[in-house]
Amino acid sequence: MFSVSKKTREERFDAQKSNPCGSPCATPSPSFNTSVRLGRGMRSDLLEACVSCATPCAVAWVKVDTQTILSIHHSVITQNPRVSLSYNDHRSWYLHISNVQDVDRGWYMCQVNTDPMRSRQGYLQVVVPPRILEKDSSTDMVVRETSDVSLQCRAKGYPDPYVMWRREDGKDINYNGDMVNVVDGEVLTIKKVSRLHMGAYLCIASNGVPPSISRRVFLRVQFPPMLSIANQLEGAYVGQDVSLECQTEAFPSSINYWTTERGDMIVNGEKYETSSIDQGYSRFMTLKIRNVTKRDFGSYQCVAKNSLGETDGVIKLEEIPVPVSKTTALNVTLSEKDRAKMKQERYSKQEAEEYQWQDTDFVVEEEIVPTEVFEDVPPKTSIIIMFDEE
């Protein structure tokens, strides 16, 4: 049921008060506009007529724009099954339209068959929430980089919908050289599209009649592989583990692999471990070489291929000298006095040096030699204490 505004009810009351229904022949109530949403029922308080005649009279409802007679007195004339009539003590007459459609929009008139004829008009506004026209709107698109692209989103409703575009991830759109968050209009045109434009876009249509509606269009931008290497020269010493890294960008996704200087493809095993991390159209590749030997020094290639092209980059692995240290050996025989003295000197301090001590039975290596090590050595034991000096 449609409820009229307070102002309108007051206007109708004032009109009835100045020309009450008990008068010889009253004029129908003042006209005013009514809005109703498509598909809903409408009781035409809009066109309520208050009529009282000394002699029999008839009330008729007419749709003005088509000059269609909808009802006369107690009878519905139109063949439209959605139209019905009701009245109250033959004074107030109501027109009902169920499941309101676009075609119901327009002017309606209430007529009283007096001489002269009396009438009032009112406008029925049918509002329609927005909807997106599928056949006239873009679906997911794939385009080549540097080409121009247009995303379309056609919407219909009443009033006419307002349409805008934005990125689903909330990032700004590079639109004709400007960074903007929203682009107005049914068509989003991007000149010389780049990989940075790749992503999901939302077309949002609204016209003040809820709900608003949106459509998701995913834009994919194709381009051949590109490769970047942060460190093209890496160093390692024999026995060390080393990792080589490169980054690629491509769409469609590329096939990525590593090769040796001889051109052999590298596969995972005891010697090599390859891994990669994908972030959108970017891929971070790593080659780990375990326990480097002299045969491992040389050039390694990072390769990326897709349907649009191929690229590679070279990383050179060179040998670096093993750190050299000077070793000092002390050959001592510990007595009780020596053990006590050691506790006070450098050999019993917890210094970050590399020590080795031994007797005739065993050798122990420690990065840090605590005091307790020397306290456990039996007296009169002949040992060698070795430590490195940079």
Image (cartoon, helix red, strand yellow):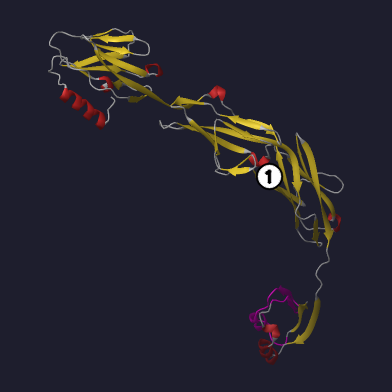
Image point (34%, 18%), residue name:
107
Q: Secondary structure at mark 1?
A: strand
Residue lying farthest to the front in this orientation: 116
- Whether residue 141 sits left or right of residue 315 in the image: it is left
> In the picture, residue 192 is in which quadrant?
top right
Residue 306 drawn in magenta: no
Can you say whether 88 is above or below 287 in the image? above
Q: Is residue 304 left or right of residue 178?
A: right
Q: Nearer the viewer, residue 107 or 367?
A: 107
Q: The N terminus lies in which quarter of the figure?
A: top left
Percent x, y for residue 303? 78, 44
378 over 1 or under it: above or below? below
| Residue 257 visible in this rendered orientation of the protein | yes
Most foreground residue, 147 or 255: 147
Residue 216's x, y, as percent? 55, 33
Looking at the image, residue 189 lies above or below residue 179: above
Residue 308, picture quadrant: top right
Q: Which residues are magenta?
A: 352-380
- The reply to whether residue 140 is in sight is no
User: Label 1: which residue?
Assistant: 282
Residue 23 in the image: state x and y as whole percent. 13, 17
User: Which quadrant of the structure image shows residue 242?
Assistant: bottom right
User: What is the x, y in percent for residue 26?
Assistant: 18, 17
Q: Is residue 188 left or right of residue 121?
A: right
Residue drawn at x 70%, y 85% as measured from the top left: 346
231 displayed left or right of 184: right
Give the amino acid type for the residue marked by disc 1 in the picture: Ser
On whether residue 362 falls in the magenta region, the answer is yes
Disc 1 crowd, CA 10 A, few/some/many (<14, 14-19, 20+): some
